[in-house]
Image: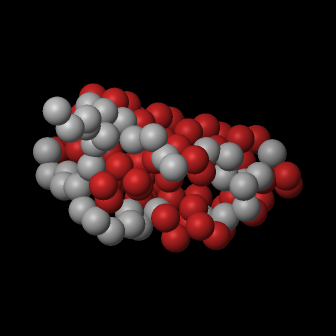
Amino acid sequence: MIKRPKTVDQYVELVKQAVFEVEELRLATEYDLEQMGGVMTFLDNLEEQVKGLWDSMVQGTYEFRDEDLPFMRIVNTADDRLLPFKFLLRVINETHRKGLDVDEV
């Protein structure tokens, strides 16, 4: 079971962290293309989709929906060694689908 964030601020931080992780992955790939070359098969799409999610939050157009975010196709097929922050993306997707983890009173 994935533990979802409880507040909007926590959720926004997760997405911000995902943007950072994608940028770091790009830098690592550019540094060592021989070892990380497989990342290039999905990196551009992943970056576009994660930044698109971030942009929708910044612009105030983001909406929770009970459907997978587009980047989940990549998460579900990419090798764990090439995409080491899969869990972060899964938490973001789970939150997108089910909303924040607010306790019922």
Q: Residue furthest front?
A: 105
Residue 39: which quarter of the image?
bottom right
Identified at 35% across, 49% down, the residue is 95
- State the scheme by which the image is colored: secondary structure
Q: Give the tally of numbered discs.
A: 0
What is the x, y in percent for residue 3?
Answer: 45, 40
Q: Residue furthest left?
A: 60
Residue placed most toward the observer, 23 or 54: 54
Q: Is residue 44 left or right of residue 70?
A: right
Tell me if residue 96 can be seen.
Answer: yes
What is the x, y in percent for residue 92?
Answer: 41, 48
Identified at 20% across, 38% down, the residue is 104
Give the position of the C terminus as an image quadrant.
Answer: top left
Q: Is residue 56 left or right of residue 23?
A: left
Tell me if residue 11 can be seen.
Answer: no
Residue placed most toward the observer, 33 or 1: 1
Residue 92, relative to residue 37: is it above or below?
A: above
Residue placed most toward the observer, 87 or 59: 87
Residue 27, relative to residue 65: is it above or below?
A: above
What is the x, y in percent for residue 84?
Answer: 68, 46
Q: Residue furthest right?
A: 34
Identified at 67% across, 64% down, the residue is 78
Q: Is residue 63 left or right of residue 82?
A: left
Identified at 52% across, 70% down, the residue is 73
Q: Is residue 12 left or right of residue 105?
A: right
What is the x, y in percent for residue 72?
Answer: 49, 64
